[in-house]
Amino acid sequence: MEKLKEYLELIQTLDPMPGASYGSGDPIYVSPDAYVYKYGDDFVIILNEEGMPRLGLNAAYMEGFTPKNDKDKEYVQDKMRSALWLMKSLYQRQRTLYKVLESIVKFQHDFFESGVTKLRPLILKDVADDISMHESTVSRITSNKYVATPHGIYELKFFFNSSLDLDDGGTVGSESVKARIKRIIADENDKRPISDEAIADMLKDELQINIARRTVAKYRTAMGIESSSKRKAIF
């Protein structure tokens, strides 16, 4: 028991969260701007309006106010127009966000069904043309916006990605390829890690994806994964 007590006293001096001292600040939690749920064979979009003010003109105030002169009347009318413009703008912003999400769900239906490996190539112009809006409008409405999906929370910009060619003439999204590379590396033998060139060959053999070794290296680096020489276990 004396030995056990000695061990317990030692354990109590240790820090249960040793990585906390390396943090740069408090964690930032993402609150999604919208939710996408599977309902039967369809997907339902629900905008997150928590914290969104319910604005309206105070009817009692407006009825009880009697302008004394034209200047007062013009002042009140000007403020009313500003208030109505603000309410209309907020409604339009939510409506635009919904339309963009609706288009993304349509284009990326396979992702919402099966996950990131089914993410298809998509650019801002595709969505802009689909909803008859300017590309810059789509870019602004998707900046710093997040959506909760059946496969996790993603930034809206995540759904826009470049394409890689397939042997059959089709294309595949770069994010899908990244997910496949990550899975290949996760399943590798750490004593015999797979090189970038070997990964490129595997993607071509298994999925008919035409990808160069340097592109694999670029994607791997972007995901924060070290090269095969540095992933190799010594013991």
Image (spheres, rainbow, N blue to C red):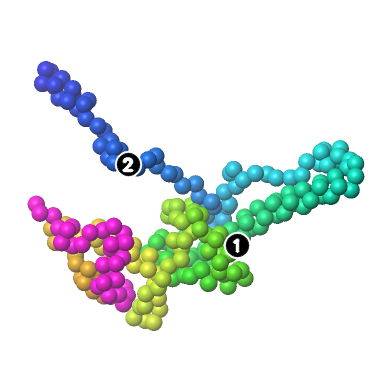
Q: Is mark 2 on a helix, strand or loop?
A: loop
Question: Which of disc 2 and disc 1 is earlier in sequence?
Answer: 2
Which amino acid, by three-letter code, is at mark 1? Answer: Lys
User: Who is closer to the viewer here, 53 or 105?
Assistant: 53
Res 70 visible: yes
Dot 2, crowdedness within 10 Å: few (<14), some or many (≥20)?
few
Q: Where is residue 65 in the image (x, y as percent from the top left)?
A: 86, 39
- The residue tagged 2 is 23
Q: Pinpoint residue 178: horizontal percent, then vertical percent.
A: 33, 64
Instruction: Give the side of residue 203 with respect to residue 92, left or right.
Output: left
Say which of marks 1 and 2 sits in front.
2
Residue, x 13% and y 55% (percent of image)? 233
Q: Is residue 116 magenta?
A: no
Q: What residue lies at 21% left-to-right and 72% top-to-bottom? A: 197
Picture coordinates of residue 48, whole percent (x, y): 57, 48
Name the kind of residue labelled 2 in the image. Answer: Gly
**Which range is magenta?**
206-235
Please tell me which residue is depicted at 73% across the width and 49% down the height of the picture: 83
Q: Residue 99 carries which label?
A: 1
